[in-house]
Amino acid sequence: MGIKNLSSLIHIYAPNSIKKIHFDDLNGKKIAIDASLLIYSYVIAIRNTSEDLTNVDGEITSHIHAVVSKTLLYLDNGITPIFVFDGKPPVLKNDTLDKRKEVRETAKKLFLEENNEEKKIKLFKKSTIITWKQMDQCKEILRAMGIPVVEAPEESDSQCANLCKENIAYGVGSEDMDILTFGSNKLLRNISSSRKNEIIEYDLNKILNELNYTQQEFIDLCILLGCDYVNHIDGIGVKRAKDIIDEYRSIDNFLEKSNEIKNKKYEVDNDYIDKVNKARNYFLNGPSIIYTNNQLKLGSLDQKKIKELLINKYSYSKIKVDKIIKKIIDA
């Protein structure tokens, strides 16, 4: 989910932190790519056609087409992508994951019962899941292409943000706004779209300056807006969340001093502040692996492996694979 309505808040209260750029502006830069989100988005878009891409054996290959096509887009524009994959989800996220699973299972069931084609496509998209095996297949093809791959210990968001903090990557390519909450100074949205589309760059330092917040105050704002790790307090929207941090500077002070809490205007769970503290710590210190620049650079292309995988396993034509190889070599 990311952070609910954070983009809207930034557009209203910190507009100078946002700018539109083009692929040319990222030429020569390393960009950390939120791999899971990229693949999910591509697969869901494919499902608009009401069916997945498959090989000759009927096995789904949409995820492979996702990483191949987007990698070529990045390389063609002089960008070195670092694909960062999720590891084991943190315990903090269990409630959110359970809800998502329930939505998928319900969608699968309704899909089988639905006769309206438009509604069937919507349910088909809602039921999307990428398996661990499919993610491993994506890693295999990327490595054969010579593209750096990172396997995060837990959330890819934390790992992506830390690659930026360590000056390995210029920014993070993702649609999830919580990349900023994790501390990445640059978030690049729309970077997985076509070359014709503008990329939206968010600058965290400028956001903090315009809001007059510390990073911890910004994290508390994001928690109030709604994140994956803490239940949202009903009734608190964009303006109220900002007003709370502006006045109280922390969720703790708000809970302790606000008459709205004392008068029970807002319903707050008994374990809310405990979850807030855990979420804060995770945003600030989420696990990640430390890399050097030299470890995350473009490697050599394994033409034999690429042909073996794309032609024999994923049913690409030889002509198409030859074109892919040429594009990688020419990049």
Image: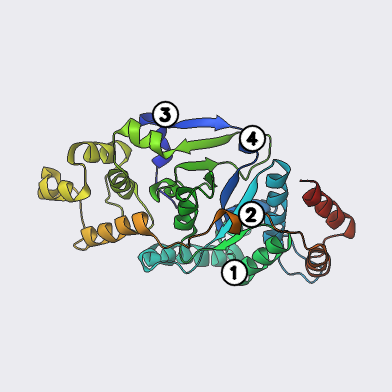
Comes first in the chain, label 1 or label 3: 3
Pinpoint residue 119: horizontal percent, then vertical percent: 59, 53
- Pointer 3 residue: 15
- Pointer 4 residue: 197
| Residue 33 or residue 40, whichever sits in front | 33
Q: Which mark is residue 297?
A: 2
> Could you tell me how far apart the alpha carbons at marks 1 and 3 are, in whole angstroms?
38 Å
> Contact (CB < 8 A) between labels 2 and 4?
no
> Could you tell me how far apart the alpha carbons at marks 1 and 2 are, in whole angstroms?
27 Å
Given the image, on which type of amino acid does mark 2 rest? Lys
> Could you tell me how far apart the alpha carbons at marks 2 and 4 are, in whole angstroms?
26 Å
Comes first in the chain, label 2 or label 4: 4
Given the image, on which type of amino acid does mark 3 rest? Pro
Q: Residues within 10 Å of mark 4 (few under 14, many from 20)?
A: some
* Secondary structure under the numbered disc 2 in the rendered image: loop
- Pointer 1 residue: 131
Q: Residues within 10 Å of mark 2 (few under 14, many from 20)?
A: some
Given the image, on which type of amino acid does mark 1 rest? Thr
For the residues carrying marks 1 and 3, which lies nearer the camera in this image?
Answer: 3
* Secondary structure under the numbered disc 4 in the rendered image: loop
For the residues carrying marks 2 and 3, which lies nearer the camera in this image?
Answer: 2
| Residue 117 or residue 122, whichever sits in front | 122
> Could you tell me how far apart the alpha carbons at marks 4 and 3 are, in whole angstroms?
20 Å
Given the image, on which type of amino acid does mark 4 rest? Asn
